[in-house]
Amino acid sequence: MESYVDKECVDKECADKVQSTQNKKESQAKLESPLFSPLTLGKIELKNRIVMAPMTRNRANADGTPNQMMVQYYAERASSGLIIAEGSWPSVTGQAYCRQPGIETEQHIEAWRKVTDAVHLEGGKIVLQIMHAGRIGSHHIKPEGVETVAPSPLHAKGKVYTDSAGMQAFDVPRELSTDEVKAVVEEHRQAAINAKLAGFDGVELHCTSGYLPMQFLCSNTNVRTDEYGGNAKNRARFSIECLEAMSTIFPQRVGLRINPGNQFNDTQDLDPVASHRALLKGVNSIGLAYVHVMRAPTPNIDAFALARQYFTGSLILNDGFNADTANEALGHSKDAVSFARHFIANPDLVERFKHNISLAYFDRATLYTPGSKGYIDYPRAGLGQ
């Protein structure tokens, strides 16, 4: 007796098999894409090329000591190839914001050690961004008697939020003497020592967004007449010396973050390409692990091309990427891509990229507020765990 099989069921079963096969091929292709391939930056080995960019979140204790929330926040994102932890001050003189972490005291070191231990336990790698704010800050934020310093005594336009007095204008800075500049370079060496004691896999120098290294680099914030002022080579000297000092502690584990053309915090430059060219050429002999370059905010500067032309090592590319455009940017290069906002609301960003799961959106209102809301309460998608 001839059995009867519903043709519609057969066609659907066949279609399901085809779709299943196609999904497997797409998943395999994703896993084989550059974004998920391993990479070594200097001596830092990455399991994939998805980097968590440093983002100020203002969740540390009032004295800059990291807390348990920060342990959870970073550990949840350890599936990335590398975490670059938020900009932390090497000395309280360089503090910019309320509840910004530091890497100056024993308490800072011990607390950061809990963060790095948690990240390493999850199989991740983490470096610390060192950020001296220079003239960006307020006496309402820093401890009493701590002054604000800069390459030149030029007041930055703008205001900063303070917990004690609301929005306040930036302090008028005092100009650093030549000897004091060298002392700040030494502060960066000590910050690297402290970061190593805290268990970090390396450090990154923040040389953009209008903070101290960029204040030295740019023509409108540096009108010095000593060896740290004048032409582009001299204006790049401070950053280069900081990187050299940090590299004595972390050989081939130091990164540099730049953003040519960035005017944040009232920083402008008559020729940002020439300034960054001098900086990039000056760091090639140091043996940096990478240069972390953000897409230029102006269309007449190709920051990625500039970095590739004048820096001989690996790059971490940043700004506006999704999984597909990141893969296109990488090709088969020796580079990685960093993501900022996507990591805020997606602690499982790597898994979401792998499985093509839509991304959650972050709550802008809770970016910098105290407490766990908008920080460690974003759920995972539930795959790849």
Image: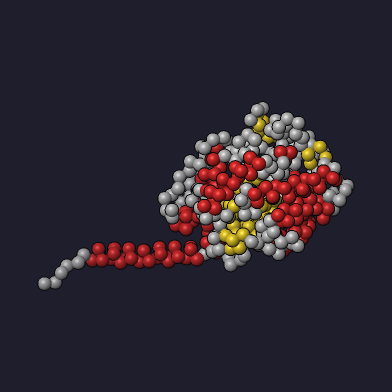
The image quadrant of residue 47 is bottom right
Image quadrant holding the N terminus, namely: bottom left
x and y percent of residue 24 in the render? 40, 64
The answer to whether residue 53 is above or below residue 331 is above
Q: Nearer the viewer, residue 317 or 328?
A: 317
User: Can residue 265 be seen here?
Assistant: no
The answer to whether residue 204 is above or below residue 70 is below
The answer to whether residue 3 is above or below residue 265 is below
x and y percent of residue 170 in the render? 73, 34
x and y percent of residue 369 in the render? 57, 35
> Residue farthest to the bottom?
1
Q: Residue at x 26, y 66 (%)?
A: 10
Q: Residue at x 17, y 67 (%)?
A: 4
> Residue farthest to the right?
225
User: Can residue 375 be seen here?
Assistant: yes
> Residue farthest to the top?
165
Count numbered badges in the picture.
0
Does residue 257 appear left or right of residue 240 in this picture?
A: left
x and y percent of residue 95 in the render? 70, 39
The image quadrant of residue 64 is top right
Does residue 23 appear left or right of residue 294 in this picture?
A: left
Does residue 32 appear left or right of residue 270 in this picture?
A: left
Its colouring scheme is secondary structure
Q: Nearer the viewer, residue 58 or 110?
A: 110
Q: Residue at x 47, y 65 (%)?
A: 29
Q: Residue at x 71, y 36 (%)?
A: 137
Q: Nearer the viewer, residue 3 or 89?
A: 89
